[in-house]
């Protein structure tokens, strides 16, 4: 009798643990979609893995849901089975790196998201793998700089500034630290050089307090009383594959010391 009770309890446990599955045919493209779900407070909630297959039975989409929202890595595949795209999602939003590929396996786009907003570097390539376009995104998804190249790697055009600097205040008292942030383009296939030069050529003492691929947090303690005009000069030298081209730009920082 005890063995029978244990068997029944085990059967109930296995039944409860078994994933519930929804399967449907998309009427628009006849793709077969499979979703795992749970029942939560009487409602059907997508939870766990999801798969989509084309008419030939090949996997074209694999992703995960959490509480009815896409969460985790999402993979798209070409009909051939090769990877087409990978995205990282959190709570239904793009969050992290997203990469798409051409059919030949080369990277098409490489983007970074923060809560569904593009930020940092945006790389867009030609099918031969050469850079087609680079875009710098700020924290709001706006684009302060964009550069375009032809399929051979020669610069076609650029807009905006690859270096943009922001001040805590443009007025400080003598003896205080002057602080500023600079956002920089991270153009691929280049070596980047940043220089700091005052308009009157007096030597400052700028320290890099924090740095990343797209930003510098700076402090200056060796300034003069009155007006200070600082040039932040950034130079990008492309590698040999990109004809050793040079792109140069300057940001102007004007501040006053009492």
Image: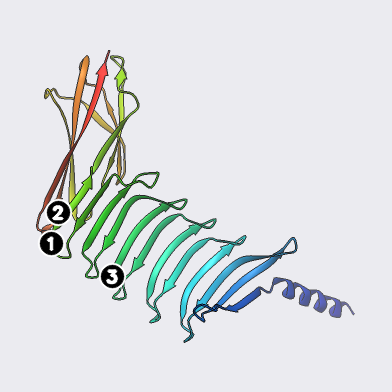
Residue furthest out toward the right: 1
Which mark identifies residue 106? 3
Q: Which circle marks residue 139 in the picture?
A: none
Above-or-below relation of 136 to 45: above
Tag 3's secondary structure?
loop
Q: Quadrant of the C terminus?
A: top left
Q: Which mark is residue 241?
A: 1
Instruction: Single out the residue that lies furthest toward the bottom.
Output: 56
Residue at left offset 90%, top offset 80%: 1
Q: Position of residue 63 (x, y in %)?
A: 51, 68
**Label whose residue precedes the other's in the sequence (3 or 1):** 3
| Residue drawn where x is 47% and y is 73% of the image | 61
Q: Position of residue 213 (x, y in %)?
A: 29, 47
**Disc 1 secondary structure class:** helix
What residue is rendered at 17% in x and 41% in y? 249
Q: Position of residue 186 (x, y in %)?
A: 26, 49
- Reading the image, the residue beneath label 2 is 238
Q: Are marks 1 and 2 in contact (CB under 8 Å)?
A: yes
Residue 88 position by quadrant: bottom left
Tell me: residue 34, above or below residue 236.
Answer: below
Q: How far apart in space, not on screen, are marks 2 and 3 (Cα)?
A: 21 Å
> Which of the 4 image quarters holds residue 105?
bottom left
> Cβ–Cβ below 8 Å for labels 2 and 3?
no
State the residue in front, 97 or 10.
Answer: 97
64 in relation to 179, above or below: below
- Say whether disc 2 or disc 3 marks the residue closer to the N-terminus: 3
Kindly indicate whether the residue at mark 1 contacts the one at mark 3 (C-beta within 8 angstroms). no
Tell me the SS state at disc 2.
Answer: strand
């Amino acid at each position: 009798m005890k063995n029978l009770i244990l068997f029944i309890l085990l059967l109930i446990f296995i039944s409860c643990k078994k994933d519930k599955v929804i399967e449907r045919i998309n009427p628009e493209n006849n793709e077969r979609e499979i979703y795992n779900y749970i029942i939560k407070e009487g409602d059907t909630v997508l939870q766990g893995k999801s798969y989509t297959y084309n008419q030939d039975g090949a996997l074209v989409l694999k992703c995960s849901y959490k509480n009815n929202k896409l969460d985790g890595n999402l993979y798209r595949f070409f009909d051939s089975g090769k990877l087409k795209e990978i995205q990282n999602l959190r709570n239904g939003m793009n969050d992290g790196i997203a990469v798409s590929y051409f059919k030949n396996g080369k990277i098409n786009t490489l983007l970074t998201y923060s809560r569904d907003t593009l930020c940092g570097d945006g790389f867009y390539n030609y099918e031969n793998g050469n850079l087609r376009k680079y875009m710098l995104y700020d924290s709001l998804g706006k684009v302060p700089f964009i550069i375009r190249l032809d399929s051979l790697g020669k610069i076609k055009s650029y807009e905006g500034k690859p270096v943009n600097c922001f001040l805590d205040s443009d007025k400080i008292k003598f003896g205080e630290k002057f602080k500023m942030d600079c956002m920089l383009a991270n153009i691929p296939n280049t070596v980047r050089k940043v220089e700091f030069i005052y308009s009157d050529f007096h030597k400052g003492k700028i320290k890099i307090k924090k740095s990343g691929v797209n930003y510098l947090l700076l402090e200056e303690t060796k300034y003069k009383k009155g007006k200070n005009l600082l040039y932040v000069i950034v130079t990008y030298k492309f590698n040999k594959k990109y004809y050793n081209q040079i792109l140069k730009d300057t940001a102007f920082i004007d501040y006053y010391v009492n």
